[in-house]
Structures are given as C-alpha cells and as structure tokens.
C-alpha cells in the first residue's frame, strides 16, 4: 500500500515544498542573473540599482529584493549550463 500523505491525488509531487533559505536564494540568483535584471528589479521594488546590486552580492539583507530577483530568475537555466551548451 502506497503512502500518499504529502501528495495530491493527481500528481506525484509533494503538496508542500521546503522553502529555501535566504543564502540559498542569493546563490541561485547569482548563477542565473542576466544583463538588465538588476535594473528591472530596482524599478519594480523602488530601490536604487546600487542597493539592489549590493543585496544580490550579499552585502546587505533585504528579503523583498531577493524574492523579486528569485521570481525573475526562477525558471532559467544557469549561466554555466548555457555557456557549456554553446561550446565555450
């Protein structure tokens, strides 16, 4: 008998995922950042581009900026993977 306590009836995915820590989010963001992401996030959050860049670099702590950056980069492939597929 299969135990499906954390699973939906139509999917094998768990119904809840463990949330990532702040440091894990920043690490994933930095692997996937692309040109213009800092500027877009600064416009969306109302912070300066310098402050957004410093938060992305880990100098300052700001949950709203990190969440905005994480949402922007979530579905992307990492830059290392993209470069390796180009043969660089």
Image (spheres, rainbow, N blue to C red):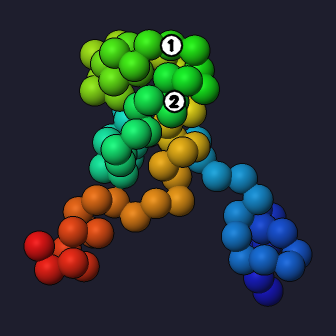
Q: Please name the residue shown 34% across and 60% down the image.
A: 78
Q: Please name the residue shown 58% across and 43% down the image.
A: 71
Question: Which element is circle 2 on?
Answer: helix
Give the residue at the far right of this rendering: 9
Residue 65 appears in the rendering: no
* Cα–Cα span, label 2 and label 1: 8 Å
Provide the residue designation for mark 2.
41
Would you call the spot at circle 1 few (<14 residues within 10 Å), some (14-19), or many (20 or more)?
few
Mark 2 touches mark 1? (CB < 8 Å): yes
Q: Please name the residue shown 77% across and 82% down the image.
A: 2
Front position in the image: 19 or 48: 48
Front position in the image: 22 or 86: 86
| Residue 70 in picture, x, y percent from top left | 51, 41
Q: Earlier in the sequence, mark 2 or mark 1?
A: 2
Q: Is 84 on the left or on the right of 46, as rendered?
A: left
67 to 72, vertically: above or below: above
Q: Is 53 on the left or on the right of 37, as rendered?
A: left
Q: Please name the residue shown 51% across and 33% down the image.
A: 40
Residue 34 appears in the rendering: yes
| Residue 49 in picture, x, y percent from top left | 40, 19
Would you call the spot at circle 2 few (<14 residues within 10 Å), some (14-19), or many (20 or more)?
many
Quarter of the image with the C terminus in it: bottom left
Q: Quadrant of residue 60?
A: top left
Q: Quadrant of residue 64?
A: top right
Provide the residue designation for mark 1.
47
| Residue 63 in picture, x, y percent from top left | 53, 21
Front position in the image: 34 or 60: 34
Q: Is 13 on the left or on the right of 23, as rendered?
A: right
| Residue 12 in picture, x, y percent from top left | 72, 77
């Amino acid at each position: 008998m299969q135990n499906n306590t954390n699973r939906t009836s139509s999917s094998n995915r768990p119904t809840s995922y463990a949330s990532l820590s702040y440091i894990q989010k920043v690490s994933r963001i930095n692997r996937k950042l692309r040109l213009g992401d800092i500027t877009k996030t600064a416009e969306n959050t109302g912070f300066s581009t310098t402050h957004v860049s410093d938060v992305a670099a880990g100098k300052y702590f700001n949950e709203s900026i990190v969440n905005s950056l994480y949402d922007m980069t979530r579905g992307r492939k990492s830059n290392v993977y993209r470069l390796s597929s180009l043969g660089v």
